Amino acid sequence: MGTFYYGKWHNQACVASIEATITVAEGIIRATNIGIPAFCLWSLINPNDVDGHWAVMGVKDGELIKYKYPFAVYSLVSNHMVPGSIVYPVNPSTDSPEIVNVHATFLEAPDGEKSMLVVNDDPESAMKAEFKLPEGWDDVKEFKISIANAEKLNEPAGKVKVENGRIKLNISLFSLLGLKSK
């Protein structure tokens, strides 16, 4: 996955911008919710001189290079979207806020770890949202939060407590949250 929406034609580096990477994360979340089971990023390793600055990481003079926004956003997605996970889609009409800029999915890894990915694709406004946990998640009392946005590159962002089977989140503008139960 990748997007030319924020770049390529006028500025090839823009495909690696926070806006482009958050848009790709949104696409992954939305596609996961409708049943698409796997994704390929364009491209994991790229010298950034082929067709845009797509690289997530690279090697220069024998050293690993982690490219700022692609590495932060895509590593947060892959850390929460474990192969073989059960997906519990969040559908705007039934169990999420009526906010078009917030997209989310719940995931349960094969080892039982429960997680959630939430993106706010609004470039101007933070959002408040409340989500109902999937059936059978009564054992979850709180989630640890990680965030990727323009200022924070996949960093811990505190915890949120589960209250009556629901969580309330404040989601900063153009950001991705990853929540984990363990």
Image: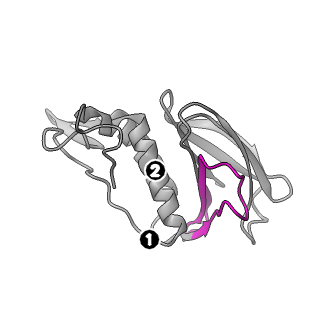
Q: Is residue 97 magenta?
A: yes
- Left or right of 70 on screen, residue 119: right
Total numbered labels: 2
Label number found at residue 98 = none
Instruction: Find numbered disc 2 in the image and state the secondary structure of the residue it sits on.
Output: helix
Residue 87: image location, x then y, percent: 57, 69
Q: Nearer the viewer, residue 33 or 146?
A: 33
Q: Give the residue drawn at x 64%, y 62%.
A: 90
Task: Please state which amino acid type lies under the numbered disc 2.
Answer: Ala
Residue 76: image location, x then y, percent: 47, 47
Q: Give the residue drawn at x 61%, y 66%.
A: 89
Task: Magenta stretch: give its range.
Answer: 87-116
Mark 2 neighbour density, 10 Å: few (under 14) some (14–19) many (20 or more): many
Q: Which residue is mark 1?
A: 37
Q: Is residue 79 positioned above or below 8 on the image?
A: below
Mark 1 neighbour density, 10 Å: few (under 14) some (14–19) many (20 or more): some
Residue 67: image location, x then y, percent: 31, 36
State yes or no: discs 1 and 2 in contact (Cβ < 8 Å).
Answer: no
N-terminal-most mark, 1 or 2? 2
Q: Quadrant of the C terminus?
A: bottom right
Q: Which residue is mark 2?
A: 25
The CA span between labels 1 and 2 is 14 Å
